[in-house]
């Protein structure tokens, strides 16, 4: 069974779907691994390390024409043309509704496993790339904020004077938000955090941050561990109540998202206008519209003296570890997908396991 690891071609993407250490495991299990030349270069994994791990270095076509294609970013139409009919795509699909790229893969008799659809059950945790990458994004967002903030994060008492700790507010305490809280705390900031799901309160406290309690008159907890969209009334109440706390923040890290919906607006322009000049907002929801209407996706802008960071791919700024976590997630997924039979390795029935069944996109009959 041939596995392909192509070079990711999306501008700014530095990650790779598998790393030499994981490739070595795959090869030892009897899989043939084809790596496109230079695929791991930007993540710090040169071709020679893949060769030493037992992979073959190939051209683009050789890495795409395989039984099991491992991708980070959604496929491009030209890539689909080179994919093997009847093969399996394992990667992010980055779309919610009708999708011509997926339709083209299905038309070739391919099976598409969308990593976004990984169910949120404990058995799937080790395979969940959304979690592993969100964790990295939460960490890197705080590093970005600290670097752009013209003051200290920790309290400083020196012979030249003293500085108060930065006040950091984290909005959305999911995977990225909790890591942002932990990172900001490690840097010595005073941290307040808010999430619409009530169960996050304990987690916020356990990281040494102060939960922000708001009474919205309704719960924001949705299905499968995700949040649900609030009513218009509750949204307005939320924005107004949050404004008081946000005005006193020096750094805001926002991570609030709802799958396949626009991100909720939590930081209004009126709040940004009144924040202390030099404050920083890192909007991790920039790709889905942003939690602040002033955020521009993939740009860093200054508005009313406040720096707004709209970087949409923070994991790509930590490419070695991001690729390593991604590769391990996929390795764990492959363990439930591939089985050894007398004649070699075979793909299991992907509808038989609840994890692969939930991820599988099939052609409509
Ligand atoms: P996410 O990226 O979809 O959203 C980020 C956070 O924003 C969430 O905590 C959400 O509640 C919050 N949010 C949404 N709307 C908001 C609003 N209007 N105001 C404030 N906050 C808002 O979520 P996520 O980080 O991927 O995960 C959410 C939960 O799912 C976490 O508790 C996580 O531990 C759990 N999870 C479980 C598994 C598993 O068991 N396999 C895997 C991944 C995540």
Image: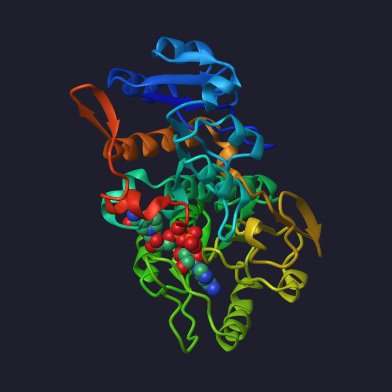
Viewport quadrant of the C terminus = bottom left
Q: Is residue 244 above or below residue 205?
A: below
| Residue with the most extreme front position | 365
Q: Is residue 298 left or right of residue 68?
A: right
Q: At 43% from the left edge and 54% from the top edge, which residue is drawn?
A: 117
Q: Determine the image quadrant of residue 289.
A: bottom right
- Foreground pick, 260 / 156: 260
Residue 42 at x, y percent in the picture? 60, 25
Residue 193 at x, y percent in the picture? 49, 67
| Residue with the most extreme left position | 342
Q: Is residue 11 above or below residue 36?
A: below
Q: Is residue 62 left or right of residue 287?
A: left
Is residue 118 in view from this perspective?
no
- Foreground pick, 340 / 163: 340
- Foreground pick, 76 / 247: 76
Q: Is residue 154 above or below residue 273?
A: above
Label total for image:
0
Q: Quadrant of ligand 1?
A: bottom left
Viewport quadrant of the N terminus = top left
Q: Is residue 15 above or below residue 35?
A: below
- Foreground pick, 291 / 306: 291
Q: Is residue 131 left or right of residue 189?
A: left
Q: Determine the image quadrant of residue 24.
A: top left
Residue 65 at x, y percent in the picture? 51, 26
Q: At 67% from the left edge and 49% from the top edge, which residue is drawn?
A: 311
Q: How is the image coloured?
A: rainbow
Residue 202 at x, y percent in the picture? 34, 68
Q: At 32% from the left edge and 45% from the top edge, which residue is drawn?
A: 350
Is residue 180 in view from this perspective?
yes
């Amino acid at each position: 069974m041939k596995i392909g690891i192509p070079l990711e071609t999306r501008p700014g993407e530095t990650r790779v779907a598998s790393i030499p250490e994981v490739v070595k495991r795959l090869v030892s299990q009897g899989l043939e691994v084809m790596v496109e030349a230079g695929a791991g270069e930007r993540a710090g994994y040169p071709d020679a390390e893949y060769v030493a791990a037992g992979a073959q270095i190939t051209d683009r076509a050789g890495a795409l024409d395989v039984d099991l294609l491992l991708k980070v970013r959604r496929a491009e139409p030209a890539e689909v043309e080179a994919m093997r009919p009847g093969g399996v795509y394992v990667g992010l699909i980055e779309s919610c509704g009708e999708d011509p790229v997926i339709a083209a893969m299905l038309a070739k008799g391919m099976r598409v496993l969308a990593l976004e659809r990984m169910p949120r059950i404990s058995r799937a945790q080790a395979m969940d790339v959304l979690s592993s990458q969100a964790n990295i994004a939460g960490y890197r967002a705080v590093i970005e904020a600290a670097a752009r903030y013209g003051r200290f994060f920790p309290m400083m008492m020196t012979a030249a004077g003293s500085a108060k700790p930065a006040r950091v507010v984290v909005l959305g305490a999911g995977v990225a938000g909790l890591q942002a809280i932990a990172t900001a705390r490690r840097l010595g900031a005073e941290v307040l955090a808010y999430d619409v799901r009530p169960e996050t309160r304990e987690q916020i406290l356990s990281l040494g941050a102060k939960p922000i309690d708001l009474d919205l008159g309704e719960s924001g907890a949705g299905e499968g561990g995700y949040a649900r969209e609030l009513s218009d009334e509750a949204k307005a109440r939320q924005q107004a109540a949050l404004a008081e706390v946000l005005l006193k923040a020096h750094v805001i890290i926002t991570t609030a998202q709802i799958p396949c919906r626009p991100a909720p607006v939590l930081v209004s322009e009126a709040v940004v206008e009144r924040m202390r000049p030099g404050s920083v907002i890192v909007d991790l929801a920039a790709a889905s519209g942003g939690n602040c209407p002033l955020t521009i996706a993939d740009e860093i802008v200054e508005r009313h003296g406040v720096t707004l960071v709209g970087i949409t791919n923070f994991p790509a700024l930590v490419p070695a570890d991001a690729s390593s976590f991604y590769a391990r997630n996929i390795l764990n997924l492959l363990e439930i997908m591939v089985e050894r039979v007398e004649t070699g390795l075979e793909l299991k029935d992907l509808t038989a396991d609840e994890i692969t069944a939930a991820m599988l996109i099939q052609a409509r009959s």
